[in-house]
Image (cartoon, grey):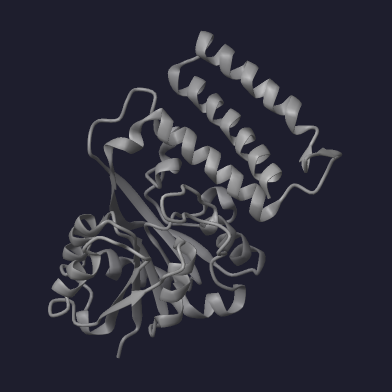
Amino acid sequence: MIDTSVVICTYNRANSLDDTLNCLTKQSYDASKWELIVVDNNSNDNTKEIINKYSGILPHLNYQFEPQQGLSYARNLGIKTATGSIIVFTDDDVLPETDWLETTLSGMEKYKADACGGYIAPIWETPPPSWLTERFYGFLAIKTDRTDDYIITNLKLAPFGANMAFRKSTFQKVGLFNTDRGRKGMTLSSGEDDDLFERILATGLKAVFLGQSRVHHKVERFRLSKSYFRKWRFQSSSNMAKSNGIPEGRRIFNIPLYLFPQLLRSVLKTIWGYVAKPADEAFYREMIVFHFLGLIHGLYRF
């Protein structure tokens, strides 16, 4: 009778995972109709012990172990394991609201959607610094810009992995998550969600945003530093270059020559930003510098 599979991929976050699993015990959706698949992506803490604690509380709890390091590998194992016709994803640092599953499933049925995403509110471990305005929320997988329902028509509107759902048939039509993209262990990277939604939109499938499908995402203190943002941008752009490449232009060491003047211009704009612009604008310009540095690193290395 299971119609929905909830997939959580986890890596060395046992204590946080405990909070997430506890939230899922309070879901208003009929517990007999959904299963929970927790994919342990090679953790070396007490993750399995925490999961076992809920084996008698969450009636359809399925533990899976994915030794290949990488979020996309773990998600793909969750998809292959799922028995439900709807697959819902959240993360091990997320606290879903009690009606999260019920709202998500009813929204997908209402709009006859093949995929959906939802609202992601932050839980700040410490108050964010003044430069960290809403323009940076996307880097932290926070999505609070709209609370209404709408059709997702382009990648700028694509949801984040902390709150998204798909019909299982969608993966049969567009394929699984790209294992060249996404976080791998402690290497910060991204792009696997956008890559998947790009294929979904290109295939003509229907994706919606559900403003009342809500979760709360923990944002640890270390993520609120500029060094974290720089590292995230650099490693994500390096991974992007490795996965997609940049085909145009004359090259040196596999790097298109036009990237060098673009990097120089972005450096000059950043310097001017710190002289004459607000703090968030100045740092946003600096992030563009690290984007170009990451691209150059990825192209040179790979």
Residue 166 percent coordinates (x, y): 46, 71
| Residue positioned most to the right | 250
Residue occupying the point 79% across, 49% down:
247
Horizontal arrangement in the rendering, residue 160 relative to residue 6 (left or right)? right
Horizontal arrangement in the rendering, residue 92 relative to residue 116 (left or right)? left
Residue occupying the point 47% across, 76% down:
167
**Looking at this view, is 23 or 99 the one in front?**
23
Rendered-image quadrant of the N terminus: bottom left
Could one spot residue 96 in this view of the protein?
A: no
Q: Quadrant of residue 22?
A: bottom left
Residue 164 percent coordinates (x, y): 41, 62
**Looking at this view, is 87 or 12 the one in front?**
12
Residue occupying the point 24% across, 82% down:
60
Q: Quadrant of residue 296?
A: top right
Could one spot residue 30 in this view of the protein?
A: yes
Q: Is residue 52 above or below residue 246?
A: below
Horizontal arrangement in the rendering, residue 47 relative to residue 156 (left or right)? left
Residue 261 percent coordinates (x, y): 75, 25
Residue occupying the point 47% across, 54% down:
183
* Figure label count: 0
| Residue positioned most to the bottom | 1
Q: Is residue 13 above or below residue 270?
A: below
| Residue positioned most to the top | 275
Residue 255 percent coordinates (x, y): 76, 39
Q: Is residue 250 above or below residue 179?
A: above
